[in-house]
Image: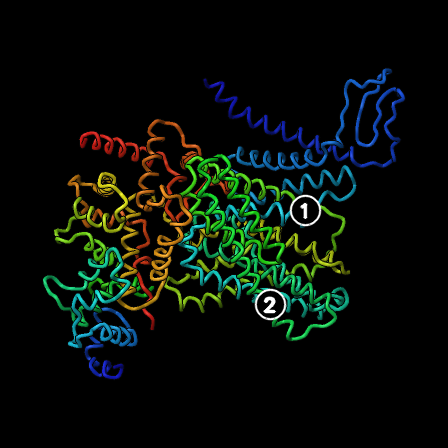
Amino acid sequence: MGSKASTLLREEEIEEIKKETGFSHSQITRLYSRFTSLDKGENGTLSREDFQRIPELAINPLGDRIINAFFPEGEDQVNFRGFMRILAHFRPIEDNEKKSVAVSEPLNSRTNKLLFAFRLYDLDRDDKISREELLQVLRMMVGVNISDDQLGSIADRTIQEADTNGDNSISFNEFIKVLEKVDVEQKMSIRFLH
Amino acid sequence: MSLSLFLSQHGSRMTAQWTLSLLLSACLFRASCSAPAIPRPPRSLHPVRGFNNSGGSLSVDLPMALRVFSVDYHHVQAPFEIVLWIMLASLAKLGFHWSGRLPAVVPESCLLIMVGLLVGGVIYGVRHSAPPTLSADAFFLFLLPPIVLDAGYFLPGRLFFENLGTILWYAVVGTLWNVLGIGLSLYSLCLLAPGSLGDISLLHCLLFGSLIAAVDPVAVLSVFQEMHVNEQLRILVFGESLLNDAVTVVLYKLFESFLRMPSVSGLDVLLGGCRVLVVGMGGLFVGLFFGLIAALTSRFTSGAQVIAPLFVFLYSYLSYLTSEMLHLSGIMAIVTCAVTMKQYVEANVSERSNTSIQYFLKMWSSVSETLIFIFLGVSTIQDVHMWSWPFVCSTLLLCLVWRATGVLLLTAVVNKLRRNTVTFRDQFIIAYGGLRGAICFSLVFLIDDFPKKRLFITTTIVVILFTVFVQGMTIKPLVELLDVKKEKGALPSVSEEIHSRLIDHLLAGIEDVVGYWGQHYWKDRFDQFNVKYLRRILIREDHQACSSILRVYQELERQEQRGDEDVPPPISVLIKGTQTAAYSRHTLHQDAGTRKPLHRHQSLEERSTINTQVGLFSSKMSTKH
């Protein structure tokens, strides 16, 4: 399975992914073997069922939303490029990258990391976290032990802490502002083994 | 009204100074009393005119046999002296904080040592003999545990475990590097100067190296307290100082027993290495055991809530004593115990008990720390000093050099494996912040007597004074100068808690997708195990359902209600603006790990915004219902 996997991934593809996401050569091949091990249907793309087969993901409160995040709008399959594009958000920011004011914003910049988290709340993609969307996520994370009233007041307070323009929902800029003191670059990074 | 204000400001300062001088004269009086030069006759019933000073009691003899007024100091001597020392220490602390600018420049530890030097000098001058020294037993059994317990209870758990690998790396390998480096270099120095230092053997040098190399948690805590450097740096230095106890204890005892043995073989060295593991892990398990039992006991304290805090202290102290009895690492035991039982105890006991626990911990550790530093100063005044310029100066130099090289090398290795690198500035502060303190001091007194022991004692004192004074005073300006990353003083908020949780779950999910068993994976697994088994057994039924989000929310609500009525909460939220940035341990700072916002520095503006928010919020609530 291993050798078959690496021949399916062409050098040019690896180069393109490298440029787009910033992963190293060995990281890309490693992640490709993970991709193919998840791909039970062996058709080069992953479906939702493939993700749901991961046992720990099934018990993650946000499991469904995370899986959803991998799939582009309206599609049911994700190829390797799309897979890597999502994972690129979680690459740690290296020192030399911070200084380069080069091309367009890299996928793992602070803003893009925060945008990814924002989209976990904002299902309807209207660039606002409404009270109902917040309540849904809260309910998923907190479980069944808290009454609706309490949850509602928590949601109200959350919106109040963030809301600056009084529209009773959290826009992306307000979201960024609330988390400005949190070290997002460190928190939202995974060490991808070399 | 202005007069009372004036009096309260200046009157208390004057009162403090008067009381301080009263105390000093009381000490002197006692000192002169208990220095019998002439054997006194036993107390007799014969009426004798004038003052009869016998056996430490003073009485005015009247012609009648009945004594109307007598002073029997002997009866209360021990507790009286202890209380006097503690009183002296606390008043000294009060005195510094009244004098505005001084605490901002000089760390408390320095000031306390200076007071100790003063008192020691005075006692020496009066009695012409050495003042009481800090006995190693008193230090290890009574003075050290409260400080370490306090540190362990308020340890930011999350941050600590995330950096655990690096901390262990520094603590174990770093300490070994320092010990061997300093020991071997000193030995080569002794070989080069056979005249004065010839009778110090290799083992002695290694023994000395083992006690002088260890970074001291008490000194580190007291200096880093108000420095507000970024949390990662603080937990690295502090965690290292806590965990290197295991290595220090083992190496010290190892070299000591080698000294007593006729010969040392390679097998002994290997066994010594195994002992490090046993001591560390043993301390850990003892602490774990007592922590779990304490948590279980706290489950049943609903009937007698007043003594619930007592269990926390009793079990922690028991764990410390048990591991000391088994020659394991007491510090590791007590820290593990505190970390283990904290979340369960906090869920089980009432809010007031929680407050009591936190308050008493802070108080005891504060008193202990003050006493330790004062006694360090007092014990410096001694008859037993032996000075040797080459030895002392080279020890100082070697300590600095070896620590710096150690940190550089170790960080270079560990940065390859870490998620977030340790920058060069942080490394400098880690190296420079390696302060020595009372642990070295006590250990050096415990060495078996040999001709150059006095030299070791003197050198240890010099090193401690140097690190506390020079390094302690200059580290704060250096932090400013080097522009080391400061901590982000985040306001507690429900939003942050919620979003952080979201990010945690998200990261755990991504790790599952990638198939990488990283931090989030293990944290998730532990959380699941915790909820499924531990919390079920160890927490009362009616308290189990608390999610951390709900807890944060409730704490904030409670805090604001108190602030709204203008009654300051018992563990006060100090108003930052009116207080100079003093080095002090008086403030309860936030436990960043669980994000309990119960104790916080809040500036005036922040408080008012929260109040307006509460106003808005409560108006919203009323419109809803």
- Residue under label 2: B181
Choose top left, top right, bottom left or bottom right for residue B424.
bottom left
With B87 as the anchor, is B198 left or right in this view?
right
- The residue at 20%/73% (across/down) is A39
> Which disc is residue B134 wearing?
1
- The residue at 78%/38% (across/down) is B127
Q: How is the image coloured?
A: rainbow
| Residue placed furthest toward the left | A74
Which chain does tag 2 point to?
B
Residue A116, how many percent across, how many down?
Answer: 21, 57
Residue B154, how many percent across, how many down?
Answer: 46, 47
For the residues beneath circles 2 and 1, the answer to whether they share a chain is yes
Q: CA distance from mark 2 to mark 1?
A: 29 Å
Element carrying mark 2: helix
Q: Earlier in the sequence, mark 2 or mark 1?
A: 1
Q: Amino acid at mark 2?
A: Gly
Choose top left, top right, bottom left or bottom right for residue B165.
bottom left
Residue B394 visible at all? no
- Frontmost of labels 2 and 1 is 1
Taking depth in this image into account, of A33 and A41 the one nearest to the observer is A41
With B36 as the anchor, is B533 left or right in this view?
left
Circle 2 Cα neighbour tier, 10 Å, few/some/many (<14 / 14–19 / ≥20)? many
Residue B135, how many percent across, how many down?
Answer: 69, 48
With A124 as the anchor, is B8 left or right in this view?
right
Taking depth in this image into account, of B146 and A11 the one nearest to the observer is B146
